[in-house]
């Protein structure tokens, strides 16, 4: 999967970053940061397109929740207690949650739907989503860029370097998954 995504990013450039950030998210943004480090793509443009893809997909998901949330959320019966908990947190810390939801592992897709179903003001969501998307793009692309810098500086064969990079990414996501109190993953 990672090899295919890497090939896709280098072949299709910024479009791959944009659509990859929309569909998959962190892995596409991270690997686009690696591509920027390898001077296959421009670092500022990678940040821009990754953020734009995340912002666009979160806005679509928000409006899905805003319009059809009452029909969609009951389908997640197994997680209904978690959904209620997240909705309570949204009411208490709305601005923070809108900006930070994309960083919460397990809530990347369902989070904006829950926020929309909570009937948050769409204009407010749009503005705060831009802030959150920009931060997300900067952070995730930069992690890929700077981890790539550190790993590629090691005196290893390139396949071993990529193996270490993939292992670090997997460990990072496992760590983030275990730390998220609202994760929908079991």
Image (cartoon, grey):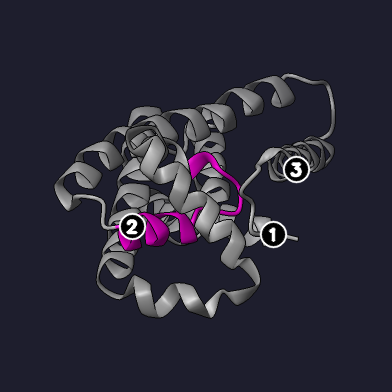
Q: Is residue 143 above or below residue 104?
A: above
Q: Does the rendering let one see residue 27?
A: yes
* Numbered tag placed on residue 118 in the rendering: 2
Q: Quadrant of residue 64?
A: bottom left
| CA gap, disc 3 and disc 1 | 9 Å
Q: Is residue 70 magenta?
A: no
- Residue 104 is tagged as none
**Which one is in front in this view, the residue at disc 3 or the one at disc 2?**
2
Q: Secondary structure at mark 3?
A: helix
Q: Quadrant of the N terminus?
A: bottom right
Which of the two residues, 166 or 93, is positioned nearer the viewer here? 93
Q: Secondary structure at mark 1?
A: loop
- Sequence-wise, the earlier of marks 3 and 1 is 3
In the depicted structure, whether residue 11 falls above or below residue 159? below
Quadrant position of residue 167:
top right
Q: Which mark is residue 185?
A: 1
Left-right relation of 45 to 170: left
Q: Residue 133: percent from the left, percent from the top?
A: 35, 39
> Which residue position is annotated with label 3?
178
Q: For the residues labelled 3 and 1, say whether their Cβ atoms are less than 8 Å apart.
A: no
């Amino acid at each position: 999967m990672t090899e295919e995504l890497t090939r896709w990013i280098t072949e299709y450039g910024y479009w791959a970053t944009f659509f990859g950030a929309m569909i998959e998210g962190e892995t596409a943004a991270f690997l686009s940061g690696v591509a920027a480090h390898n001077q296959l793509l421009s670092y500022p443009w990678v940040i821009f397109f990754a953020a734009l893809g995340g912002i666009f997909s979160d806005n679509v998901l928000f409006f899905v929740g805003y319009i059809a949330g009452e029909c969609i959320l009951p389908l997640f019966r197994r997680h209904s207690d978690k959904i209620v908990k997240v909705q309570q947190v949204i009411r208490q810390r709305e601005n923070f949650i809108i900006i930070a939801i994309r960083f919460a592992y397990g809530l990347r897709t369902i989070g904006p739907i829950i926020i929309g179903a909570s009937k948050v003001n769409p204009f407010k969501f749009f503005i705060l989503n831009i802030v959150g998307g920009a931060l997300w793009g900067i952070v995730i692309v930069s992690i890929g860029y700077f981890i790539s810098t550190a790993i590629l500086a090691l005196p290893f064969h390139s396949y071993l370097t990529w193996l270490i990079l993939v292992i670090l990414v997997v460990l990072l996501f496992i760590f983030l998954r275990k730390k998220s109190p609202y994760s929908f993953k079991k």
